[in-house]
Image (tube, grey):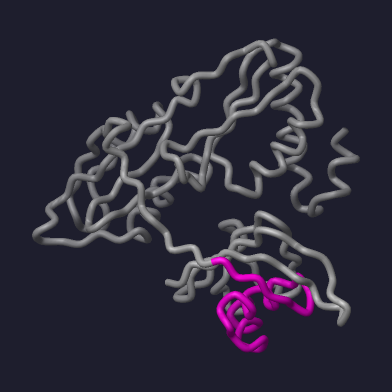
Amino acid sequence: MEENIKQHFRPNEGAFIDQVADWISTASGQYRPVLTSFLNPRQRYIARTMANAADEVKMASAGGWAGAEMQRVLFYPSYYQPSTADFELRVLEINYPTKFTELHHRQIMGTLIGEGLERAAFGDILGDQGRWQVVVTTAMAKYLRANVSHVGRAKIKWQPVEAANVLHPVEDWEPLTTTVSSLRLDAVVAAGFNYSRNRAKQLVEHGQVRLNWEEVDRPDEQVVVHDLISVRHGGRIRLDEARGVTRKGKERVSLSVVHA
C-alpha cells in the first residue's frame, strides 16, 4: 500500500508515510489504539488518506482546543470508542510577572526548542492579550513544570488549565481565490501577499520562508493542498484547494491568508 500511496505525495514524505503505515499496522495487528506525537495539517492529511484506505482501522485527532493546528492522532480498531483521555493532552498556562515583562510567541517557541524538544513534541502555543498557554502531552507537562523555570529572562511557573479556561485565539484568515503561473513556492508566496515574484524568490532563498514548519530555500519547491507557508514579517498562507488549470494555462487556487 505504501508504494502506491507514495506516488501521490512528495518524495521527502516517504519516511513519514512509512511511519503512518507502521502505526496503522500496529493498531490493526495488535487490536489496540496507537497514539502519535503532534502532527501538522499536512501530516494529518496524509494520515487520513492512509487510514481511509485501511481495513478495520479508524483515525481521530485532537489538539487541546477546537481550532488546533498541531494535533495528536489516534489510530484505533473499528470496534474501539476513543475518548478525550486517550489523547493524553494537557494545557499549561505560563504564569509570569506581566507588569514587568512581555512575552512573545517566538520566545516561548525558542525556550521549548532550546530544551531539546522537536516541534512534534508539543502542540499549539496560544496567546491572547498577554496570556500564554501551551498544549503538551501529559508526560511533557510534568517535565516542564519540574525543569523549565524561565522564558528568556522572565521567571515563570507552569499552571495547569482546565478545558473550560483554554484560550481560543481568533486568527483573521482571509480567503483568497486567485491564479498562479505554477504551484512553485515563490509563486504562491507572491500571490498570497501581493509581492513581486522576484521579492518572493529572494525571501525563500534567504531563509525567510518555512513550509510546514521546515525552512526551505528552493523557490521551485512545489506547494500542495494543506501545506502551510510561513513568511517572516509577512504572515501565513494555507493552500486550501487546487482548482485546476485555466484556459490560459494558469493554476486556479483557493488560499487562506493571515497577515502579520
Residue at 31 percent of width and 53 percent of height: 127
Quarter of the image holding residue 154? bottom left
Placement of 74 over or under 2, stated as above or below: above
Residue at 70 percent of width and 78 percent of height: 187
- Of 120 and 115, which appears nearest the observer? 120
**Magenta stretch containing residue 187, yes or no?**
yes
Residue at 25 percent of width and 59 percent of height: 103
- Residue 106 as seen in the image, left or right of residue 229: left
The image position of residue 184, as x and y in percent, is 74, 72
- Of 8 and 122, which appears nearest the observer? 8
The image position of residue 31, as x and y in percent, is 69, 10
Residue at 76 percent of width and 71 percent of height: 252
User: Magenta residues, as a range?
Assistant: 175-204
- Residue 192 as seen in the image, left or right of residue 109: right
Quadrant location of the C terminus in the rendered image: bottom left
The image position of residue 144, as x and y in percent, is 32, 37
**Magenta stretch containing residue 64, yes or no?**
no
Residue extending furthest toward the left = 99
The image position of residue 89, as x and y in percent, is 42, 30
Mark count: 0
Placement of 66 over or under 232, stated as above or below: above
- Of 253 and 76, which appears nearest the observer? 253
Placement of 103 over or under 133, stated as above or below: below
